[in-house]
Amino acid sequence: MDFQQGLITTVHDYNLALEDPVLLRQGLLQRPTTILIPCLMEEFRRPALALIRSVLRELEGLHQLVIALSASTAEEVKEAESFFSQMPFPVHVHWTNAPAVMELLQGFTNQGLDLLGTPGKGWAVWQGLGVATRSAEVVALFDADIRTFTPAYPRRMLLPLLFPSSGVAYVKAFYSRLSLESHALQGRGTRLFVGPLLSALSQLLGDSPFLRYLQAFRYPLAGEFAFTRDLAVNLRIPCDWGLEIGLLSEVHRHVALSRIAQVDLGLFDHKHKSLGSSPREGLQRMCSEILTSVLRGLMEHQGRTIPAEQVATLEVLFRRVGEDRIRQFALDSAVNNLPYNRHYEELAVQDFAKLIRPGVEQFQKDPLTIQLPSWSRLLSCASSLQDDLAEAGLDRCGAGGGSSSLDLSALGSGASAETLLQAAR
């Protein structure tokens, strides 16, 4: 790895330093630290979560592990608790769609707050942060499907925040996304959409501090990040696939660049999303929502928007940059003897380019995206909400007592909050 630094601090992996568990343990004991894992019940059927559990079991000094779990029944939640029962630190399995949670959050509607959001990772992260920041000074988030999880992941993500002299408040991961089976490059959302999009926007709009900030991150869509409590409670949390970009936008709003770091985690692999056969499926849907998040960030931070007469220019620039990147990825793969399907990547860029015009037009019509309010705002309305939410997420009997037999899986991931609430009742 190189040793270059840029707009934000970069922590490289030089593959030379020996791990020092004593240093990490001392830091964890000095600053109460919680690891948060948003999780679907299906992850308990896959080997990745078992690997993560075995690695974390050796993490001495961790204050707490919070599992923000979406489950269909109370029995599934108990299964998850049993799965983590042998950990050497407290584990809080928070049932994000428990009937008691749904009822609690619905109660804030009369105060003009929509806390049900859109069920998904963003909603789970928001709830998990509410539970975790009750007692933790540092919170680190990891996905539940990481197939390459090693002790270096939590160590490297946490250490910058455990050194008070560093002044770091936010840490973002970057890594090499390679398939464990084929060794082919993955991360198409970052390589073939976000990278070309940011480059094309920079050429179109000229100097842009916000775009330069996003481009400073080597893997802006990385779902692994960590922050201090005072930052975590002040972030609005997006509820769609724009979560990672939306959080970077929030961090940009609250934190000086000198307090941000990105950390190299080396080789990384997890579940891969298909491209999708329409703009409402797979990676195409994800990238459509990421586009909205980038456009909203430009509007919020710089008061900039894309005029209708420049949309065609943006499309052409995106295609050209995407094709240039494909040539670079092909050479990179060839020299490293990695398989590379250039034709397939070209088709992906073509599909991504088709998302730009309808995405910009839809954003102009409705620029407001769903964001859950920060916990600092909520606590000014209800000072006990964090404790109330944590207690509701532990309710294994349902809001009205008795055994819960709620089957949310039959409703589908796109079910509305109102539908979920009615099912919960």
Image (tube, rainbow, N blue to C red):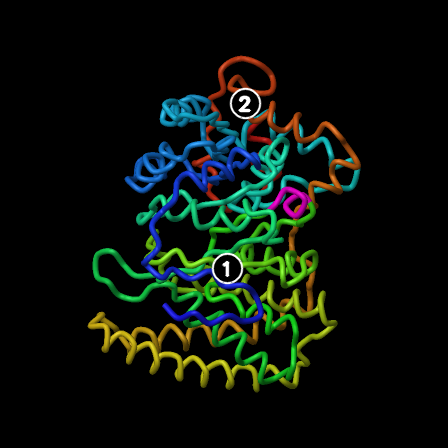
Mark positioned earlier in the residue sequence (2 or 1): 1
Q: Which amino acid does label 1 sit on?
A: Gln
Marks 2 and 1, how far apart in space?
Answer: 34 Å
Q: Residue 360 carries which label?
A: none
Q: What residue type is labelled 2?
A: Leu
Q: Which residue, as the protein is rendered here, is positioned at the far top?
A: 402
Q: Which mark is residue 262?
A: 1
Quadrant in which the C terminus appears: top right
User: How far across and down, in percent of the image, does residue 269 sit?
Assistant: 33, 54
Q: Main secondary structure of the magenta part?
A: helix
Q: Give the range drawn in magenta.
A: 228-233
Mark 2 lies on a secondary structure that is loop
Q: In this view, does 343 lie to the left or right of 94?
A: left
The local crowd at label 1, few if under 14, some if 14 to 19, many if 20 or more residues have their Cα within 10 Å, is: many
Q: In this view, does 88 lie to the left or right of 289?
A: left
User: How far across and down, in percent of the image, does residue 26 sit?
Assistant: 49, 37
User: How far across and down, in percent of the image, does residue 63 sit?
Assistant: 51, 31
Q: Is residue 149 above or below residue 324?
A: above
Residue drawn at x 40%, y 84% is: 324
Q: Residue 394 carries which label?
A: 2
Of residues 149 and 294, the one nearer the viewer is: 149
- As for residue 195 lying within the magenta part, the answer is no
Q: In this view, does 7 lie above or below 111?
A: below
Residue drawn at x 69%, y 41% is: 375
User: How far across and down, in percent of the image, does residue 264 sit?
Assistant: 42, 59
Residue drawn at x 63%, y 29% is: 389
Mark 1 lies on a secondary structure that is strand
